[in-house]
Structure formats: C-alpha cells, structure tokens
Image: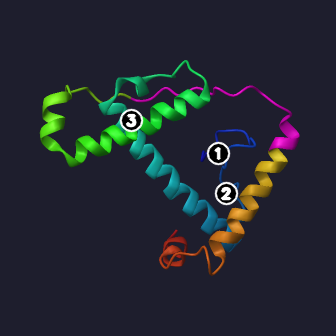
Amino acid sequence: MVADDAFAMKRYLVKPYSARNLNLQQRIFNYRLSRARRAVENAFGILSSRFRIFGKAIPLAPEKVQTIVMAACCLHNFLFRNKSAAAQNMLEIPQQMADLQSVCQPNKINRHANDAIAVRDKLCTYFSSTAGAVSWQMNAVNAI
C-alpha cells in the first residue's frame, strides 16, 4: 500500500523518503510514489461517490474488504462502459470522503519498519534503473 509521510513505516506500507537532502534516485522514487497515491486517491474518490460502502471504514476482515473493492471496481467498469445500465440501476449519490481506518493489528514495529525500508530502497533502485524508469520522470523531477 502507498501512503504519505503522516503514516508510520509498516511492513505492508510504502511511504516517501523524508524531504531533506534527497539524492536523485530518492527524488524520483518520491515523485513516482506521489503519482501512485494520487491515482489511488482518485480511484477511491470515484468509488466512494458511487458506492456508499466506501464512505466509512468497512467493519470486515481484510480479505473480505479486498473482495468488496474488487467487486466495486468491476461494477464501476461495467457501469462506465454501459451507460444505459448505469442509468437504470444506479441512484445519484453525493461525493463522500472515505474515512478509512487501519484494520491490521500492531506487530513488532522495528522488524516491519526495517522490512518496509528494504522494500522502499528496492523500489527506489528499480524506478531509476533502465527496466523501471519512465521517459518523463527526469523532466518531472528536475522541474520540482
């Protein structure tokens, strides 16, 4: 999962490098992570405006929440492609902000933080490599 600086490092969470004294690879990583976060936030904004279940924390096991999210994405895509089905089957729902809360139990923080740092460093290296770089990232990072 992607997050911003406000969250603590967790095994399952990727967050940006601190904004001080960043090298080029770290700036590229932060930029690419920021783009990923914006894409996810936009997608959940669309889903929460269409499906009420995303307007607050879902009181279910993470596996069931994953199934609900996937089903909502499939329904959204179906309704997006089939405008007549959407008009017949969906009510207008006002945009709501999702109030997501953590559903994970706290674990051994140091080990998981170290795991998260290792994952972040591997992604950082990948985003700057020939295999993981995108053509526009240098222009975007240099413009910042």
For the residue marked with disc 1, what is the amino acid?
Answer: Asp
Residue 128 is situated, as x and y percent measured from the top left of the image, at 65, 75
Residue visible at 49% across and 58% down in the picture: 35
Which one is nearer the viewer's eye here, 112 or 68?
A: 68
Pointer 3 local density, CA inside 10 Å: few below 14, some 14–19, many at least 20:
some
Q: Earlier in the sequence, mark 3 or mark 2?
A: 2
Q: Which element is circle 1 on?
A: loop
Label 2 or label 1, whichever lies nearer to me, is 1
138 up-or-down from 40: above or below: below
Give me the C-alpha separation between circle 2 and circle 1: 9 Å
Residue visible at 42% across and 28% down in the picture: 54
Give me the C-alpha separation between circle 3 and circle 2: 35 Å
Q: Which element is circle 2 on?
A: loop
Q: Are marks 3 and 2 in contact (CB under 8 Å)?
A: no
Q: Are marks 2 and 1 in contact (CB under 8 Å)?
A: yes
Residue beneath disc 2: 19
107 in magenta: yes
122 up-or-down from 51: above or below: below
Please name the predominant secondary structure of the magenta segment in the image. loop
For the residue marked with disc 3, what is the amino acid?
Answer: Ala
Label 3 or label 2, whichever lies nearer to me, is 3
Residue beneath disc 3: 72
Residue beneath disc 1: 5
Q: Earlier in the sequence, mark 3 or mark 1?
A: 1
116 in magenta: no
Residue visible at 37% across and 32% down in the picture: 48
Give the extent of the magenta segment. 97-112
For the residue marked with disc 2, what is the amino acid?
Answer: Ala
Pointer 2 local density, CA inside 10 Å: few below 14, some 14–19, many at least 20:
few
Residue 71 is situated, as x and y percent measured from the top left of the image, at 41, 36
Give me the C-alpha separation between circle 3 and circle 1: 28 Å
